[in-house]
Image (tube, rainbow, N blue to C red):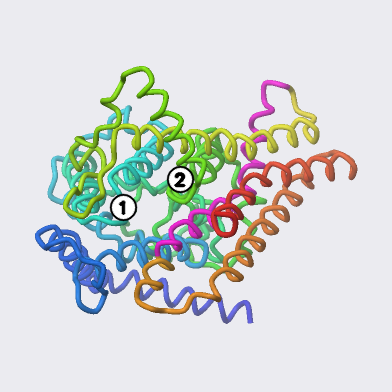
Amino acid sequence: MASALGRTTARFAGFLRDHAPLLRKLQWGIVAIYAFLLVVPVFLPLPGNTASVFNNLTVLAQFAFWGIWWPFVLVSMPLMGRAWCGWFCPEGMLTEWASERGQGHAIPKWMRWGGWPFVAFALTTVYGQLVSVYQYPLAVLAVLGGSTVAAMIVGYRYGRSKRVWCKYLCPVNGVFNLLAKLAPWHYKVDEEAWRHPVIRIEPVNCAPLVPLRHMKGAGDCHMCGRCSDYRGAIALTPRSPEEEIVDVAHGDGWQTVLICFGLMGVAIGAFLWSASPWFVTFKQWAATWLIEHDVTWPLIDNAPWFILTHYPEVNDSFSWLDGLGILVFVGGAVLCVGGAAFLGLWLADRISSLAQPQSRLAGVHKLAQSLIPSAGIGVFLGLSATTVTLLQHEGVRTGWVAPLRFTLLTLAVLWSLRLAWRVLGQRPVGLVRRALSWLLVGAGLAPFCLAWWLFFVAW
């Protein structure tokens, strides 16, 4: 059965390789739909309370982007790897198209900085909340459209037929890289066959700049199939979804920051602030303090729409204090939820590691990879909350959602704990220290779980 599955995946990869022009036509079709839904709603009146996906293009675009696209693109990563990037993504296609016709400059050193995946994700997430990207077409155009224009500029300037933007600057590249490590297949490289090719060697363009000969996992691969059977050494191969986390991935400092303080910190703060009574309490306290000290300008809602939400025609405008409140709430989530997750990992590593002090963080980074399922489900739950809200607006019954949410959260946390147990099992320590370390990893996830209970139940 395993060999039959392997032959099927190999044939599919060969189909992708041999039908690249067909895939490019599909991508152009997606670009056209993407551009239409991105641009046209900007010129339409804002929808009223009775607007529906069936009678209003703006609501349809909102549902397409935030109800379907982003939540289920995330779901596709642990199921199919980064197939979205290689087969469908309009930004990836456009940046490569621009690079084919561009200046071909060398990639600058500043662009190769390892912190961009976290910084780009954090800035985009927070900015999206400040301008209410889930609600308004102008905000969508600023966030998604601005990212697309930047991708094309980078593609035109740097590389030759490459996806430099995707490799280094895309705001979700780091997220996709992490989640794709859970995919049940990847392009496996046979290094022995690579050294002794039995077929004629033809050049292959790896647009996302993956070093093919040394490719070990699925995190960077866009699953486009161009390298399938290259040198008779690369094949799309089934694998255990835990293989890369346990046996391959070592992680690094910026990936750990993205997991703990990005996906389990910034993202949670961005999702929870609008439902939190703590946010309201902070705003009331701050407003009272400001008035008592005769400082009133932060209470004014005169910021332009591209800085803070400003749509007075529908009575929705943020004051400067609102913007500050969002930043404070997100910062609090980073410290309380992300900080707890990191502290649990650090303590677990201290107890289970026999390494020298200067190398201990390497163990933390390896152990942090086990939190990827929990971090990923958190982002999905937050994004899918918009899906549920839109479905409720259309009159769809959603009583089944709460049990499904907590089932998914429970399974993801259990998976993370299983991965942590396996990673800790690779260390030369006794069962007691291994178990204590594992419990500390679980304790670090407690604020993460509590946050979702507050969001979906208490608030």
- Magenta segment: does it hold 384? yes
Q: Are marks 1 and 2 in contact (CB under 8 Å)?
A: no
The location of residue 155, given as percent across then percent down, is: 21, 45
Tell me, yes or no, if residue 50 can be seen here: yes
Residue nearest the observer in this picture, 368 or 341: 341
Residue nearest the observer in this picture, 115 or 109: 115
Inspect the image, locate mark 2, and give the three-letter code of the amino acid beneath it.
Trp
Where is 363 relative to 129, above or below?
above
Residue nearest the observer in this picture, 386 or 146: 386
Tell me, yes or no, if residue 96 can be seen here: no
- The residue that appears at 31% across and 63% down in the rendered structure is 65
Inspect the image, locate mark 1, and give the three-letter code of the amino acid beneath it.
Ala
Quarter in which the N terminus is drawn = bottom right
The location of residue 20, given as percent across then percent down, is: 27, 69
Query: CA separation, marks 1 and 2?
Result: 38 Å
- The residue that appears at 45% across and 65% down in the rendered structure is 76
User: What residue is pinned by disc 1?
Assistant: 207
Disc 2 is placed on an element classified as helix
User: What residue is pinned by disc 2?
Assistant: 273
Q: Residues within 10 Å of mark 2 (few under 14, many from 20)?
A: many
40 lies left or right of 267:
left
The quadrant holding residue 115 is top left
Helix, strand or loop: magenta stretch: helix
356 lies left or right of 449:
right
Q: Which residues are magenta?
A: 357-386
- Magenta segment: does it hold 414? no
